[in-house]
Image (cartoon, grey):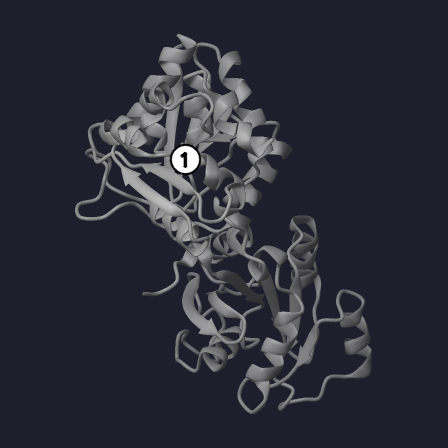
Amino acid sequence: MKTLKSMRLHIGIFGKTNVGKSSLLNRITNQDISIVSDIAGTTTDVVEKSMELLPIGPVNFLDTAGIDDKTALSSERIEKTMKILNRTDVAVIVCDYNGIDEYEIKLIKKFDELKIPYIIVVNKIDEKPLSDAILADLQQYTKNILITSATSDKDLVYKFKETLVKLLPDDFVNMPKIVSDLVPKKSTVILVIPIDKEAPKGRIILPQVQVLRDLLDSSCLSLVVKETELQNALDNLKTPPSLVVTDSQAFKQVADIVPESIPLTSFSILFARLKGDLKEFVKGASAISKLKDGDRILILESCTHHAIEDDIGRVKIPRLLKMCTGKELVIDNIAGHDFPDISKYNLIIHCGACMTNRREVLSRILLANQKNVPITNYGIAISYCLRILPRAIKMFE
């Protein structure tokens, strides 16, 4: 089974048109992923390619349109390219023997602002050697410079990986635990998984699978039950479980059953810690009590799916917000990687983000902070509305 994109290192490839970005990607992947042409602007939309880049591990390359694109659709293409920054863990700037100018410098400033590590790849040196003056100019920005030719350098892939290894984010090298660091090894954990209209047929959803795998890796005894069987499960255990993790939608029912002495949280709250900033999300949830009639709420989902009649983001959370606040609120739902102008919103509620990487979620949190818009996530918002948030996050204190 392939590693999910959300668990891969996202490597963004940026640069002007016709400097060899696509040739570089094709060479590294050993496949014709991107069209190569002498015509400027050949790469139009972002091209994605997932692969195992040994010994680094699972990666996802993002080949972008030229940042100096002057075609009819240039503004849209460049906008898409800039949005990719929010998903980029490590950036690669490709230039040729002419070095860089204001286009690349603008990108570098964004990398520094977003704390994205980057490599400068000087391509096409088979056509003309790189001058000492241009090399000195590049070294003002970074020491991570690869001078090569995507068409003739036999050692290109090795050199690229050697340079990339130095820039790997710590949370990729030392992948954080989802839940196993919160409980003793070989302890018992109950996972409460409702089988309702939103449950996919014949399987359980990704966060539940990932939590289960994390517990297995820690030799824990995982007891998986529906909310209707929870009481029976507790009664049949000789000793209380170390933790109960529930789907957020069953929070109230589960909280009423599980004794206060047993730690309780939700899958979504575990992912708030894994993919985002738990403290920031908890802080953002307090904005719910300050909402007024007519306030706008943005509900963000990482993945796209067909909404059902009792959809959590479109029905259940809006209903819960109205019940909690007693206010008439304006709710907007957006799915996927798009992130709109958020200045008009009074609160953002993000999904668990199981289908996107941590960089994208942190970028959204950063932008929300810059615009002074509170941001939280599904599980924390639900537990806040149900007045059980202090209990749901107690184990993280």
Q: Residue at x 37, y 13 (%)?
A: 322
Q: Foreground: 300 or 103?
A: 300
Q: Position of residue 289 (x, y in %)?
A: 50, 13
Residue named by callout 1: 241
Q: Residue at x 71, y 71 (%)?
A: 144
Q: Position of residue 221 (x, y in %)?
A: 37, 46
- Quadrant of image for the N terminus: bottom left
Amino acid on which disc 1 is placed? Pro
Residue 4 sits in quarter: bottom left
Q: From this view, report whether residue 68 is shown above or below residue 246.
A: below
Q: Mark 1 Cα within 10 Å, few/some/many (few <14, many 20+)?
A: some
Name the side, left or right, on which 248 lies relative to 75.
left
Residue farthest to the top, as pictured: 326
Q: Foreground: 241 or 298?
A: 241
Q: Position of residue 249 (x, y in %)?
A: 32, 28
Q: Position of residue 354 (x, y in %)?
A: 41, 46
Q: Foreground: 316 or 37?
A: 316
Could you say whether the residue bearing mark 1 is in a helix, strand or loop? loop
Q: Residue at x 62, y 59 (%)?
A: 169
